[in-house]
Amino acid sequence: MGGEQMSYGTQGLGRARGRRVAVGYPAQYSIGNASSLNAYQSISDSAYALLERGEDGNGIAPTDSGYYRHTLTLSGDTTCTTAQFKRGAGGVALDGTGDYLSAPAHFGWDVRGEDFLFECWMRPAGLTTDFGIFEMRVSATQKFKVLANSSGQVEVSVGGLLSSLPGAAEVTSTSTLAKNQWTHIRTYFDVSADTLYIQIDGTQEDSSGAGFDDTSYFDYSTSTPTVGYTVDEGEAEVCTFDDATFIVGAAAVDIIKTADPNTIFPPEGWPTTTYNP
């Protein structure tokens, strides 16, 4: 894990119904069409728990441009890049040696009784070992984790390992990440169906019933969410992230879970208001 850590004033994490987390949104957009723009605008400003654009921080350091304006900690030499990006003119580059982003513990990560969704665009340069993509972790048996295995498949778990913790769920993609190519990863938990889902490039590939009888598993408010790192797998290999997003709330999740990842994304300058307690 290692590496120098730097903190930057940012704009994002929080507690509100239907909130959005994103890492790697570029500062420039070409809106795909009116319907995609309207879909994101139908989510309230407070839906944006963390919104990180690739060119924010003067194109040097990724910062959070979301509703709650928290501080991101950048480990290693995590930085913005204009060499690789999915949207606009920049993404977030990790060099595989101690690089990742983390957000502070916050009441906004308590998702008990809520639908929640994580998605991102990812372009790995290497696929030689298991590595972390995203994690909210309180303990080994209380976490939400997304990782890539050494075969390039994406694995997602809530709770703990399915084999060892009753009331947990685990899903695995059937398709694989490809080196030096952008892949869209989306996973969400539907609380009414008690089911975890995974999509790759907009296609559902696996689902698993959870059987949770204790919703305290979903209180991650004491965790420090990480992008590009998980405790068990370590930091991501050399890669670029764009549009990494975490959403909570059934209304927002219902909009995003059926969205074409190639056409729907929020416009520049969204959200238009910020948290003022």
Image: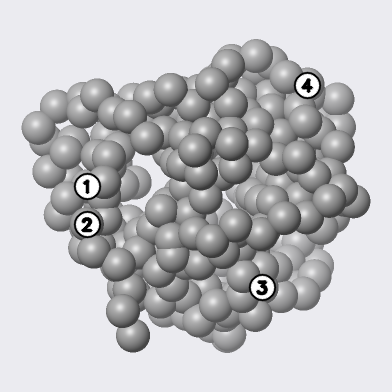
Q: Earlier in the sequence, mark 2 or mark 3?
A: 3
Relative image position of residue 112 (x, y in whole percent): 47, 80
Measured Cα–Cα span from mark 1 to mark 3 = 27 Å
Q: Which residue is mark 2?
A: 272
Relative image position of residue 40 (x, y in whole percent): 22, 47
Nearer to us in this view, 211 or 182: 182
Q: Earlier in the sequence, mark 1 or mark 3?
A: 1
Q: Which residue is mark 3?
A: 223
Which quadrant of the view contains residue 150?
Answer: top right
Q: Which part of the image, by quadrant, shows the C terminus?
A: bottom left
Q: Earlier in the sequence, mark 3 or mark 4?
A: 4
Q: Nearer the viewer, mark 4 or mark 2?
A: 2
Q: Residues within 10 Å of mark 1 (few under 14, many from 20)?
A: many
**Marker disc for residue 126:** 4
Q: Earlier in the sequence, mark 4 or mark 1?
A: 1
Give the residue displayed 76% in from the left and 40% down from the top: 77
Measured Cα–Cα span from mark 4 to mark 2 = 38 Å
Q: Which residue is mark 1?
A: 40
Q: Earlier in the sequence, mark 1 or mark 2?
A: 1
Secondary structure at badge 2 equals loop
Q: Nearer the viewer, mark 1 or mark 2?
A: 2
From this view, report whether residue 163 is shown above or below residue 205.
below
Q: Residues within 10 Å of mark 4 (few under 14, many from 20)?
A: some
Secondary structure at badge 3 equals loop
Q: Residues within 10 Å of mark 3 (few under 14, many from 20)?
A: many
